[in-house]
Image (cartoon, grey):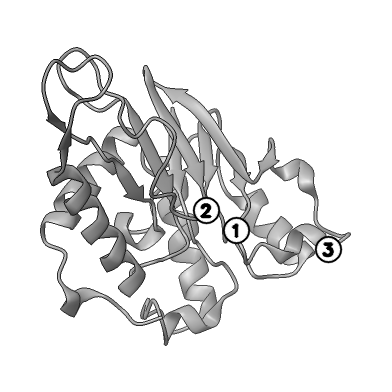
Amino acid sequence: MRYYISDCHFFHERMNSAMDNRGFSTLEEMHEYMITKWNKKVRNGDEVMILGDFSIGKGTETNEILARLNGRKFLIIGNHDKYLQDRKFNQNLFIWIKDYWEAKDNKRKVILSHYPIMCYKGQYKFDKDGNPTTYMLYGHVHNTYDEIIINDFINETRQRKRIIKDSESEITVPCQMINTFCMFSDYEPLTLDEWIKVDAARRQHLVTGTINKM
């Protein structure tokens, strides 16, 4: 099984009182909750794609967290992953570390980047039944006003019609951008299918009043 998650921000105590307002009373409480949620879902043979900002801790601290988490872990580098430059960090705890990745997931293509890519490769791709075949998974923006902007872009793009390859008439653009922010899944890594459902439900009810400031 393959899972995705982003912006865990281990060791980032400020996430409890500002920006995310996660609400945990201590950093240790946040860590234990996140680790428990992760390990209840992920088995050791599973793959977990981490879309950046895993930890702001030092190398040895981050080693300890990674060692406690189930699964084969892969990292898409985020702007806060400074522990990668720490000589005491064990990079072998990740299967690989990349800035960007394109892959297949159950006959669908996934574009993985820490930063949202609004004009991503495969944005216009769909199957013979009109279903999108490419998904752009991202992180970085958490649940902020930037996510409102992205949501507006998605909605506007999906309303536009044009003739594209394999279409006989004008069709709407199947723009599929999914924010894999850990709080949207209650800190559980999710499969692509699970993220598709979570994202659709969340965007349907996305309003300014529920978004945190940067």
Residue 93 visible (yes or no): yes
Q: Amino acid at mark 3?
A: Asp
Question: Of circles 3 and 1, which is in front?
Answer: 1
Numbered badge on residue 114: 2
* Label 1, residues with CA under 10 Å away: few <14, some 14-19, many ≥20: many
* Label 2, residues with CA under 10 Å away: few <14, some 14-19, many ≥20: many
Q: Where residue 141 appears, x then y in whole percent?
A: 42, 65
Secondary structure state at the residue bearing disc 3: loop
Mark 1 or mark 3, which is nearer the start of the sequence?
Answer: 1
Q: Amino acid at mark 1?
A: Gly
- Reading the image, the residue beneath label 3 is 86
- Reading the image, the residue beneath label 1 is 78
Disc 2/disc 3 C-alpha distance (Å): 20 Å
Residue 40 visible (yes or no): no
Q: Amino acid at mark 2?
A: His
Question: Of circles 2 and 3, which is in front?
Answer: 2
Q: Nearer the viewer, residue 52 or 58?
A: 52
Residue name at image x 42 percent, y 86 percent: 18
